[in-house]
Image: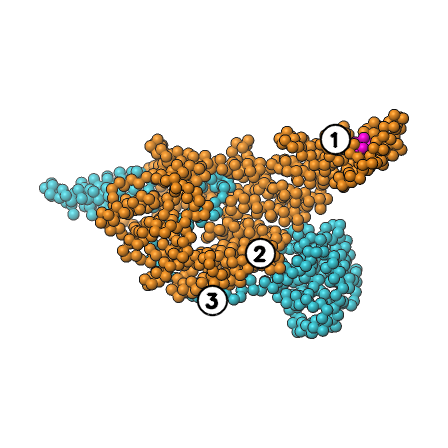
Chain colours: A orange, B cyan
Amino acid sequence: MPCSLRQGMFFEPNILQVSHVFSVFYSGSATLPKVEGTNITGIEEVVIPRKKTWDKVAVLQALASTVSRDPTAAPYAFQDDPYLIPASSMESRLFLLAKKSGENAAKFIINLHPKYFQKDIAEPHIPCLMPEYFEPQIEDISEAALKERIKLKKVKASVDMFDQLLQAGTTVSLETSNSLLDLLCYYGDREPSTDNHFQQSGKSEELVKDTGENDKKSKKADDQFGVTWRAKNNAERIFALIPEKNSYSYCTMIRGMVKHRALVQALNLYAELLNNRLKADVYTFNALIEATALNMNEKSEDKWNNILELLKQMAAQKVKPNLQTFNTILKCLRRFQAFGRLPALQTFREMKAIGIGEYVSWCPSLEGTTDKTSLLSHSAENPSKGSSRIIYDIMNEITGQKFTPKDPDDDMFFQSAMRVCSFLRDLELAYQVHGLLNTGDNWKFIGPDHRRNFYYSKFFSLLCLMEQIDVTLKWYKDLVPSVFFPRSQTLIDLLQALDVANRLEVIPQIWKDSKEYGHTFRSDLKEEILMLMARDQHPPELQVAFADCAADIKSTYESQDARQTAPDWPANSLNCIAVLFLRAGRTQEAWKMLGLFRKHNKIPGNKLLNEFMDSAKASNSPAQAIEVVKLAGAFSLPICEGLTQRVMADFAISQEQKEALGNLTSLTSDSDSDSDSDISEGI
Amino acid sequence: MLCQRKTKNNVQRYFGTNNTICSKKDEQPASMHEISKETESQESVKENTKKDLLGIIKGMKIELSTVNVQTTKPSSTRQLKSVEATINKLQKAPGDAPKKRTKSLSPELVAAASAIADFLPFDKQTTKSELLRQLQQHEEVSKAQKNGGRAKISVSNIISDMKVAKSATIRVSTRPVHQIQFDEGSDDYMSQKTSDVKKSLRKNMLKGKRLNIFDLKAVTEETSETETTPSLWDIEFAKQLAAVNEQPLQNGFAEMIQWTKDGKLWEFPINNEAGFDDEGSEFHEHIFLDIHLKDFPKQGPIRHFMELVTCGLSKNPYLSVKQKIEHIEWFRNYFNEKQDILKENGIEFN
């Protein structure tokens, strides 16, 4: 990379100027022109162009902004081998997990055997491809070694090093002691449960060395409930050993205690801190608020008064509250159930009044919103409270804003907002929320897969319920499957919307889609589809399409038979399929369906039998008609008699057949009472 | 929904200001005396009331399809409730507007207008004619809006400008209310209730009594905090935050951005400076090194030599500016150390 190249690349037009400068140089003038071009007599002002600095991702960002979502394609993350593109939410989950665990496994192997991965082929060097060192490099006993162990988050090794240093008589500086306390308090005096990379691959146990059998057991329990704070643990011991504790030492201890649910100790330590005339920082106050709220033995009202007391202390000590302060309060108030409502509102207003977040934008109160909406949607079951209504105010405030993450619960917002919309049945609001989601990079806040699915399912169900069918179908095309895979309930909602709008011709397409998205064996969905198709008479072309669809559904029932030991053929479905076949003129298959009724011992509906009779009449086949009567007779249906009369009237039948019919009717007339209830299930 | 979304804010505000009257009405529909009193007071704030009314009517959503007017959908029923509650206290207006104006309007619209008139519990002819007159007047406007926004004609937009004539004496008829309530079925109570609550909360949700613990000044006041290295707590919190909006990548460029940030990809713009750290120095600093020769003699063999050195350095792409200057410094020191020899040979240095 010669300099001349470097200059030539970006300053082409200025080469003339440069050579001019050269000539100035060599003409023997004593002082050189500065970059700014200080005027020397007789020399023109030369402005040397500044070097342009490019952001390394600016070009890519510009390019990326030109690419919009393709509703006909799978999301980019799934674009790999076409065979592997997932077609249901289950598959997509598997896909992502498989991809991630592959990466994790590779990383794990590299870090486990760094010596085999030393070859550095990249020029310039790429650090992230090289193995990371998790083992401490400094062997001797010194404060530097302690610092290294703290940095590598080796809890036990750090404690040992600290003890050895003390035994050797070396004093550890307050700063290092405090960072050791940080480590101990954050992880509750346990080894951190390894890096996130390994958590999913399930290898974490192997990585943790020096953990006894007992530790392992408790570790599993801790994963669920968080590590509990043990009395007289290393953190407390080292805290006692520090000769000159400053407020930071106290603060980190309090935070650690609250994190690991040693609430009473935390509050006591705060009293001790005050006695030592030290000041707590805002994070500690946040922790204390949490401790107060979690304290089991008090009533909600007392807890709230204690929280207020803490806030007043903050104000007195001139500690500025931050967003987490208020979010902690709101989260705690959520636990207070009904009592928490008014305080929550007041807190929210306080937050707004002192402008937490307002001067940047409203995004920080997004979290407040989150808590608020979920708080309110908890009580949403009871509409008389109408508390979900705050969403309107919040939406008015934040519409059109772009969010940046400020709180770990930020990704809850859209889910909660859409749930409230769905509860309120307010499509306008849902559109507003959806608009907000598509503002800037806000879509990133939709959260993990299941939250996205929840959000879009609710949104789409609301569309099915309230929107015109054409618009709904447009959304359907846009969202499914490139954004989310519908659940069977979502599809049933869509079917009902189609029914309401009298657009049943779309149903075969919906069935195709639902097969695609893994709902082949959802009997509620299949029954809904069949019921809608069979309910009314349709024009012939549509009946043909419906019959194809019905044949397809029938085949899924048949393959289901192979899968399961107990075959499940709902009578409704049998009825519907047979009717659809009949109406489409596929008489052969329809008659076969009658055999299925017998095989699975299901009762055919009256309407179906009548239709069969019509069909038999149309083909002028008395044998078929008698077959129908026989079937009805076999199930002892009361309609049998009517059918017999119809056969007698409509068909030219032989004497033999007449006698057979006579027998049938006499058989059924005795026992038709017990089949009454069954018939009502038919069409 | 056909309702124009841009009027939404207004609608909500009007709901807010009008709510007390509405809810009172709902509670005591039979108390004629009180209502007429209230109307008297309304006369004094006639302008405001009219505005409120307009707002409410604006909020009314009516689904227009080519065949019929549907009001069965929940949102429209909910909105209709409030309209009906307000209109309830209005008097039948006398007079009948001529129908000839309707000729430029499409028959569908006329049908829709009469359908709306059917819903409103006062003189149907009046309402209809009012509607149609407004349709006429705002035909241009709605055309423009139709072109600009949604393809279908928005009835709510049209009736948003509808005025309902009000006579001096007020008579309240409760019959239509019950009729409509009956029609709307069982969910009516709930929707009415929630819309009432919505209105009452509209006022005080974000404004009202606060904790009054913190002072705005004290909080916004800038205090120069001493910069400390982030603690483990800060780092872990930052990690949590970063995980919040982590999403699968949307396109290939986004992936390249990710790789660039990881350091796996050659950085844009692609040039020969990748991995070369020269602390943002500019090209002239690399090339014009004579500036560093000030302390050297103006002429003579040392000058000549140093000019050759700077010439060579200026062509060397592998050294940073700092290294180049260090190189020149080295020669300065070298010649300084060799002063004796230089003097012996009669060469000036300084």
Residue named by callout 3: B212
Residue A418 in picture, x, y percent from top left: 58, 51
Which amino acid type is marked by label 3?
Asn
- Mark 3 to mark 2: distance in Å? 26 Å
Residues in magenta, as a range: A628-633
Check chain identity for marks 1 and 2: say if they share one: yes
Above or below B218: residue A182: above
Determine contact: label 3, label 1, CB under 8 Å: no
Above or below B119: residue A461: above
- Mark 3 to mark 1: distance in Å? 78 Å
Give the prevailing secondary structure in the magenta stretch.
Answer: helix
Given this view, does label 3 or label 1 mark the residue nearer the observer? 1
Q: Residue at x 66, y 66 (%)?
A: B22
Given this view, does label 3 or label 2 mark the residue nearer the observer? 2
- Mark 1 to mark 2: distance in Å? 52 Å
Given this view, does label 1 or label 2 mark the residue nearer the observer? 1
Which amino acid type is marked by label 1?
Arg
Q: Secondary structure at mark 3?
A: loop
Specify the subunit that label 1 lies on. Answer: A
Q: Secondary structure at mark 1?
A: helix
Residue nearest the viewer, comparing A596 with A448: A596
Which amino acid type is marked by label 2?
Ser
Residue A522, quarter of picture: top right
Q: Residue at x 51, y 62 (%)?
A: A343
Q: Is residue B246 left or right of residue B114?
A: left
Above or below A24: residue A356: below
Crowding around mark 2 (Cα neighbors within 10 Å: few <14, some 14 to 19, many 20+) is some
Residue A621 in picture, x, y percent from top left: 84, 28
Residue named by callout 2: A379
Is residue B38 visible to the viewer in this orientation of the structure? yes
Residue named by callout 1: A598
